[in-house]
């Protein structure tokens, strides 16, 4: 067992250990996918900060932000 695990995570692992092997594997793959996604988001944030620090950012108005989000998410209003 990993020595630096939170009590909550340790309890979750304890409960998952009681499940069938196939179900344990599904939980494990879900956790691995979530951790990978978390690392990806963290890297994108770090990249954005580096770009801002390098002066590559530009001002974004509320109107432009809403238009970009509406386009991305398919909203008309």
Image (tube, helix red, strand yellow):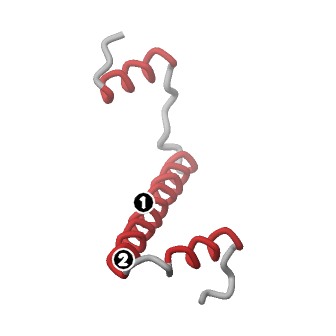
At 64% from the left edge and 73% from the top edge, which residue is drawn?
11
At 64% from the left edge and 76% from the top edge, which residue is drawn?
10
Q: Position of residue 47 (x, y in %)?
A: 48, 55
At 67% from the left edge and 68% from the top edge, which residue is drawn?
8
Q: Position of residue 12 (x, y in %)?
A: 58, 71
Q: Is residue 29 above or below residue 47?
A: below
Mark 2 highlights which residue? 25
In this rendered view, identify the residue nearer to me: 16 or 10: 16
Pointer 2 or 1: first along the chain: 2
In what element is the residue under mark 2?
A: helix
Tell me, for residue 37, which label it has, or none. 1
Tell me, for residue 71, which label it has, or none. none
Q: Nearer the viewer, mark 2 or mark 1?
A: 2
Image quarter of the C terminus: top left
How many numbered marks have been drawn onto this rendered protein structure?
2
In this view, which residue lies farthest toward the top?
Answer: 77
In the rendered structure, the answer to whether residue 5 lies left or right of residue 41 reads right
Residue 20 image-quadrant placement: bottom left
In 3D space, how far apart are the residues under numbered discs 2 and 1 (Cα atoms)? 18 Å
In the rendered structure, the answer to whether residue 8 lies left or right of residue 73 reads right
Q: Position of residue 1 (x, y in %)?
A: 59, 89
Residue 15 image-quadrant placement: bottom right
In this rendered view, identify the residue nearer to me: 26 or 34: 26
Badge 2: residue crowd in 10 Å (few <14, some 14–19, many ≥20): few
């Amino acid at each position: 067992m990993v020595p630096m695990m939170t009590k909550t995570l340790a309890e979750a692992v304890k409960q998952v250990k009681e499940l069938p092997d196939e179900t344990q594997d599904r939980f494990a793959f879900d956790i691995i996918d979530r951790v990978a996604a978390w690392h990806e988001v963290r890297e994108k944030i770090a990249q954005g900060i580096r770009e801002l620090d390098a002066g590559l950012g530009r001002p974004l108005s509320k109107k432009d932000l809403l238009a970009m989000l509406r386009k991305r998410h398919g909203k008309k209003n």
